[in-house]
Amino acid sequence: MSLNEKDIDQILEIYPAKVKRSRKKHIIIRDAEQAHQEMEANTRTIPGIITNRGCAYAGCKGVVLGPLKDIVHITHGPVGCGYYSWLTRRNKAKTPEDGKNYLAYCVTTDMQETDIVFGGEKKLAKVIDEVVEIFKPNAITISATCPVGLIGDDINAVAKAAQEKHGLPVMAFSCEGYKGVSQSAGHHIANNGVLEWMVGQGEMTEAPAKYSINMLGEYNIGGDSWEIDRFLREIGYHIIAVATGDGSYEDLKNAHVADLNLVQCHRSINYIAEMLEIKYGTPWLKINFIGVEATVKSLRDMALYFGDKELIEKTEEVIARETARVQPILDQYRKICEGKTAFCFVGGSRGHHYQKLFGDLGIDTVLAGYEFAHRDDYEGRHVIPDIKVDADSKNIPELHVQPDPKFFKLKISPEKAAELKKKIPLSNYPGMNTEMKDGYLIVDDLNHYETEEFIRILKPDIFASGIKDKYIPQKMGIPSKQLHSYDYSGPYAGFNGAVKFAEDITAMFTTPTWNFITPPWKGKPMLEGAMQKEAK
Ligand code: CFM
């Protein structure tokens, strides 16, 4: 079933006029005929509306910094902030030989009322001393939570003093939860720190091997990075650093020597990708390893960037073998999935990426959206110069980087880059909108009320989103798949991931559970009418 402007107006009718006007700007019915469809995004959620967004602290500590395993990440704040960002994201990591993997620990200053009244700096310094003594990590990060900003603890001064005292990097991130309008602000704050304090701290001046790359914006949720790593290494790529899934400070220190940066999640890492290009002369390539077709395209784009015959041949060999292996399995699952429809509403990149995987199985995404993406994630990077800078975004420091005097090296000539840009998304992301089919819906910062209303009209066969909203659709009789944590499953990336995903969602479609649930619309007429008064 499709939906038109009138349906949207009817859904929004319940809001006060101002709210209605605002929400309307966050909803688009895709129409390729229109030259450009603008999406309002990265603005404040209206108070009272139940959003799925997180906070700046979540984006900084939880998303970007948290997966770095040889660092002890200290949450300076009340215990809850540390506790709820403690591995719930399922960013996995393998322990290296030196044993430096601290992800299983939740380290927090556990601020109490007295700390809020008299200040928490001393307590923070003491926690750092304890961390150094117990763990001897390669580095320490401190992430500020809301009260820290409110009482004015100077975490930078504490970090500086501790760094001098202990002789190891101690990095402070002012990512108080209230900064910005969502976790997106925290990504930016974390990106700045990673670039300033981590990348370029190593001694390497040359790429250590042929085809040296960094993988940016891949967080190893459910083991995704390991599956990607498997075929990239086989093809012959040398992965210097991953930002940040199963990543480490030690690896990131030498990220500046890579020949190419891959960008999986554009939203959370585009700042670093862009700054690495300016500072070290390394271009970035937008890839997507979610879905077989998308993975194959990404591998071919990478091979084209390097342009070596040997690499292209090896790429094709691996693609041929992997697709021959997984396609017959996917074809079986496709028999059950084909023709079904999906809602795909995730944070800032998966709302787009997973449409490819659904597509591999013959499932159409009829509604997609992001919790906290910016206009460029919907409309493409070319709109960046037109994006209004509001008070909330001004809150986040912008780094203005220059070419690094020691390490800057143009990895490809400007002529070669210009030529490649015509064929592959080099330093470019065209956004989600371009790939949505006409008549389908794109919604920014979808909320719980609208979710229910859109479900009633579009009746998707699967609802893909997160923990906050999954159970209502599930109770409406729609299988709900978490695409943040994968519901304890995964990996879903690459070739093996596609098979795992197909297996999981086919099981959801075929479970007999649904025979015991009656969706609300089954007992309620879909068309309602009223008798006209008789004319006299
Ligand atoms: Fe990037 Fe992510 Fe996402 Fe994200 Fe996230 Fe995540 Fe996400 Mo949850 S970094 S924007 S802040 S792909 S935690 S691994 S699933 S909302 S779509």
Image (cartoon, rainbow, N blue to C red):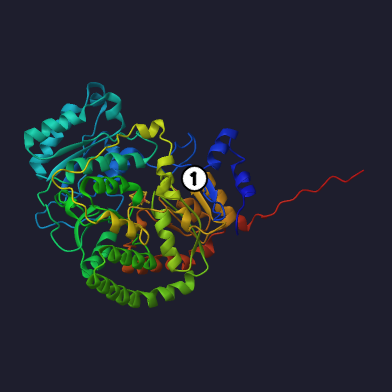
**Number of numbered markers:** 1
Asked if residue 419 lies left or right of residue 518, the reply is: left
Q: Nearer the viewer, residue 36 or 420?
A: 420
Left or right: residue 254 versus residue 43 is left
Q: Residues within 10 Å of mark 1 (few under 14, many from 20)?
A: many
The reply, left or right, for residue 33 in relation to residue 370 is right
Q: Is residue 17 above or below residue 329?
A: above
Residue 238, relative to residue 443: is it above or below? Answer: below
Determine which residue is flagged by label 1. 39
Label 1 residue near ligand 1, CB within 8 Å: no
- The image position of residue 217, as x and y in percent, is 29, 52
Tell me where residue 124 appears, x and y as whole percent: 17, 32
Q: Of all residues shown, which one is farthest toward the right?
A: 536
Q: Is residue 409 visible?
A: yes
**Residue drawn at 37 percent across, 59 percent down:** 422
> Residue 369: percent from the left, percent from the top?
46, 50
Measuring from the top left, give residue 391's x and y in whole percent: 40, 30
Q: Residue at x 25, y 40 (%)?
A: 192
Residue at the (53%, 44%) spot, across then down: 449
Q: Amino acid at mark 1?
A: Met
The answer to whether residue 86 is seen in the rendering is: no
